[in-house]
Image (tube, grey):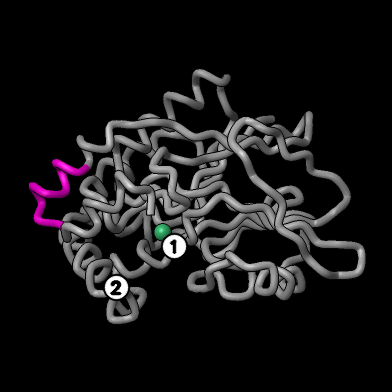
Amino acid sequence: MRYALLADIHANLAAFTAVLGDIERHAAVDELWCLGDIVGYGPDPGQCLELLQECKHISVAGNHDLAAIGKLDINLLNPEAAYAVRWTSQQLSPEDVTYLSSLPAVIERDDFTLVHGSPRESVWEYLISTSSAEKNFAYFNSSFCLVGHSHIPLVFKQDENGGCSSIPFTAGIGQALGKSRMIINPGGVGQPRDGDPRASYAIYDSESNVVRLYRVAYDISATQIRMVKRNLPMRLVARLEKGL
Ligand code: ZN
């Protein structure tokens, strides 16, 4: 079986569409595993929700998903994110709200645990350092944990002595899943933050037991124009081309 690992689509339809096209080019997948933040920041929340639901998928809830349906305090977000979430919540149909309300915080599937932020704090914690990753291995039972939220592709591997190291997660190079437990972030589809503005996602092949990262160029200006038309904050518009 093959699974596409997607995080942080963030209502960026051009990026999401480009990623789905790229997945098809590499060979079809059996299911999408979505790590939350389907909406927020971007200009096309309804269309991204619709497109995701057309695909066979499972998804956890992200902080922006919860904020957009009033399940998380908007004031906990930075002012630009809060503005975008308020705008997003005005665009959602009753069906969109029902769907977002149905998303769980944690999904366990095969030998994977899916969360948005971290297994210790499913919605809020950013897993970007080995010190925080090390502590989080105690908070899930499966061998592997998939996270999003930081929008940065990362792999943390637990050592035999319980320590932790980060290993490079480079596009195109397969990451073999072995006996060591790992926390894996496939990067962000709709707002990458590792300095590479291309959309980021990964494919997990359960037969070869390999996770491979992919980067996909998409029409960034198309998304930016749509954001400007919707009066979304200019800093959010500008950051897309920088990938930061
Ligand atoms: Zn996000």
For disc 1, the marked residue is 62
Looking at the image, the residue that sits furthest to the right is: 160
| Distance from the alpha carbon under mark 1 to that under mark 2 | 13 Å
| Three-letter code for the amino acid on which mark 2 is drawn | Gly
Answer with the quadrant where ligand 1 appears in the image: bottom left
Give the class, few, some or many, for how many residues have Cα within 10 Å of label 2's Cα (few <14, many ≥20).
some
For disc 2, the marked residue is 70
x and y, in percent, of residue 201 in the image:
52, 40
Is label 1 within 8 A of ligand 1 (CB to nearest ligand atom)?
A: yes
Nearer to me, 92 or 174: 174
Residue in view at x 42 percent, y 49 percent:
192
x and y, in percent, of residue 88 in the image:
21, 59
Looking at the rendered structure, the number of numbered marks drawn on it comes to: 2
Q: Main secondary structure of the magenta part?
A: helix
| Three-letter code for the amino acid on which mark 1 is drawn | Gly
Nearer to me, 15 or 105: 15
Q: In the rendered structure, does residue 209 fall within the stretch colored magenta?
A: no
Relative to 86, say whether 189 is above or below: above
**Which quadrant of the figure contains the C terminus?**
bottom left
* Span colored in magenta: 224-232
Residue 106 is tagged as none
Residue in view at x 54 percent, y 34 percent:
214
Nearer to me, 140 or 81: 81
Residue 178 sits in quarter = top right
Give the class, few, some or many, for how many residues have Cα within 10 Å of label 1's Cα (few <14, many ≥20).
many
